[in-house]
Image (cartoon, helix red, strand yellow):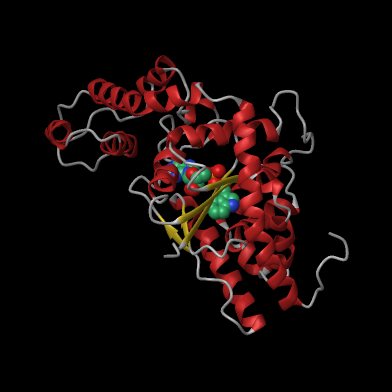
Amino acid sequence: MVKPRVFSGIQPSGELHLGNFYGAIQNWVSMQDRFDCVYCIVDYHAVTSRTGRESDKFQDPAHESISAMSVQMAGDLIACGIDPQRSILFCQSDVPEHTELAWIFSCVASHGDLARMTQFKEKASRNDYVSVGLFTYPVLQAADILLYRAAKVPVGADQIQHLELARRIGRRFNTLVGEDYFPDVEAELTDGNRIMSLADPSQKMSKSLGDKHYVGLMEEPEAIWGKFRAAVTDSGQEVGEQMSAGVANLFELLTLTGTPQKAIHVFMAQHAAGNIRYGDLKKSVHENIIRVLSPIRDRRSKMSDDTISDILAEGAVRASEIAQETMAVVRDHVGVRPPRIS
Ligand code: TYM
């Protein structure tokens, strides 16, 4: 039986954090049984975050190269349970059809739709130099997904708008060529699809906000405790008052880490009665997180960069086969002949 195809991507922005893990990667892992999964380290997307200031350089001595970070990210994903035997795991820049299809799609996407993207507006407001690449970022994302004719995309809630755009681009392409070639793209969300920063629970957990705003999967347990200890809660709840964002985030992590319902109920009852000790809640979340992370850290420590690079090379061969097939059909529809040289 042919399994439906799934595609998802992640930027090689350094190590994985709890937001990535509970927001997306858990679904990446669990979907491997039922779907034909294609997972991509989107290194060309990461170029947009290196050109946000007038003074930026592609290669900054303070940053590792995008390629080194891609290998690191692939290792983290494998340690989390992505199985390169069952799923395709590869790097975007190894399959040039991604950028090729992105160009065709940039002739299909509407400027007005792109201008409405909230992530673009947010990032553009933070940067003093706004590149065209930052603007067309979601077009490349649509190309990533549709190159593999994938319908289901496991992501966190912050990507929903980008996926709606991918759906619109696919549909418009289909209308232009008079054939239902690309499937409708839909998001597959986890229960933890929006994990918030511990230091500022009004913002999603993210590396780009700075060190105290995320918890890396490979961080030392003491460093992780430091971040939980400092997590923003509130200065005591009045009975019946709505739970603050920081406390709700801690409860969410408690649930996601598989804490027994009984223990959660005890904290919930204390919270409702207004006598919860946030230090105890934080300790419990921390203990549970370390329990989840420790086998992942063990697996990661046994992997070498060479082994990971070989896995990515194999993944690129498998991804290329599908990508070339799609590009041949797209070129034909658009009226551009196959390359004169191969
Ligand atoms: P990226 O690299 O920022 O994040 C990777 C995945 O992690 C999810 N995520 C979160 N989920 C819950 N809470 C959080 N705090 C949190 N932070 C991150 C993201 O939703 C994402 O699923 N544009 C994408 C990368 C991309 C892509 C694609 C995704 C490029 N092409 C094609 C899917 C399909 C991004 O920047 O994700």
**Which corner quadrant holds the N terminus?**
bottom left
User: Image point 13% across, 31% down: which residue?
Assistant: 266
Q: Quadrant of the C terminus?
A: bottom right
In this picture, residue 217 sits left or right of residue 281: right
The spot of residue 259 in percent (x, y) is 22, 33
Instruction: Kindly give the residue lying farthest to the bottom in the view shown.
Output: 178
* Residue 82 in picture, x, y percent from top left: 47, 41
| Residue 157 appears in the figure | yes
Where does residue 99 sit, x and y in percent of width and height? 72, 56
Residue at screen point 72% across, 69% down: 328
Residue 273: quadrant of the picture: top left
Residue 119 visible (yes or no) = no
Residue 54: image location, x then y, percent: 79, 38
Which residue is the extreme one toward the right?
340
Q: Is residue 262 above or below residue 24?
A: above
The quarter of the displayed image where residue 285 is located? top left
Horizontally, residue 236 falls left or right of residue 318, namely: left
**What is the count of numbered marks?**
0
Q: Nearer the viewer, residue 155 or 84?
A: 84
* 267 relative to 332, above or below: above
Q: Is the residue 252 above or below the residue 133 in the image?
A: above
Q: Nearer the viewer, residue 276 or 307?
A: 307
* Residue furthest to the front: 1
Q: Residue at x 43, y 57 (%)?
A: 35
